[in-house]
Amino acid sequence: MAYTTAVLLIVLVFVGIPLQVWGHQSIVARVVGTIHGYLYLVYLLAAFDLTRKLGVRIGWMLLVLLAGTVPFCAFVAERKLTALYNRSASPAGPPVPSVTGDRGAVTGPPSER
């Protein structure tokens, strides 16, 4: 949702609005603006749900939610939340014990032996 909202906002700001102001053609701004508006509501719900599940502090949550209103900020917010999610979703398992065999000490998971 972050990428979709960000791309639509960029198209709106850098194509739709200039066409509306200088080209006197408002169809792009109306269509893209409407689509961005509805998808931004979906983005807000998805981002709120994700930040709540990740336990993000309220200040960061508000920044993520507002990222859909500033061009290119949603890309940054998505990258940071994805990194946070990946860190929280991949639990660090217990360390693999060393195994002593005929060839000496072998350490690490079996796939690396």
Image (tube, grey):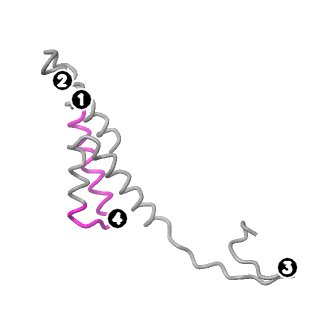
- The reply to whether callout 3 and callout 4 are in contact (CB within 8 Å) is no
Compared to residue 19, the image places residue 61 above or below, namely below
Q: Are marks 2 and 1 in contact (CB under 8 Å)?
A: yes
Answer with mark 1 or mark 4, whichever residue precedes in sequence.
Answer: 1
The kind of secondary structure element at disc 4 is helix
Main secondary structure type of the part rendered in magenta:
helix
Q: Secondary structure at mark 1?
A: helix
Where does residue 66 sit, x and y in percent of width and height? 20, 50
Location of mark 4 (residue): 54
Is residue 37 at all visible to an observer of this figure?
A: yes
User: Residue 97, image x and y in percent?
Assistant: 67, 82
Kindly identify the amino acid type of the residue bearing the numbered disc 3: Arg
| Residue at image location 31% in from the left, 52% down from the top | 77
Q: Give the residue drawn at x 20%, y 30%.
A: 33
Q: Which quarter of the rendered picture does the C terminus lie within?
A: bottom right
- The CA distance from mark 2 to mark 1 is 6 Å
Disc 3 versus disc 4: nearer the observer: 3
Q: Earlier in the sequence, mark 3 or mark 1?
A: 1
Task: Indicate the amino acid at tag 1.
Answer: Phe
- Does the magenta portion include 35? yes
Earlier in the chain: of badge 3 and badge 4, it is 4
Kindly identify which numbered label has been placed on residue 18.
2
Mark 4 neighbour density, 10 Å: few (under 14) some (14–19) many (20 or more) = some
**Numbered circle sitting on residue 14:** 1
The span picked out in magenta is 34-60
Residue depicted at 65% across the width and 78% down the height: 96
> Compared with residue 60, is residue 44 higher up or lower down, i.e. above or below?
above
**Marking on residue 103:** 3
Q: Residue 97 vs residue 67: left or right? A: right
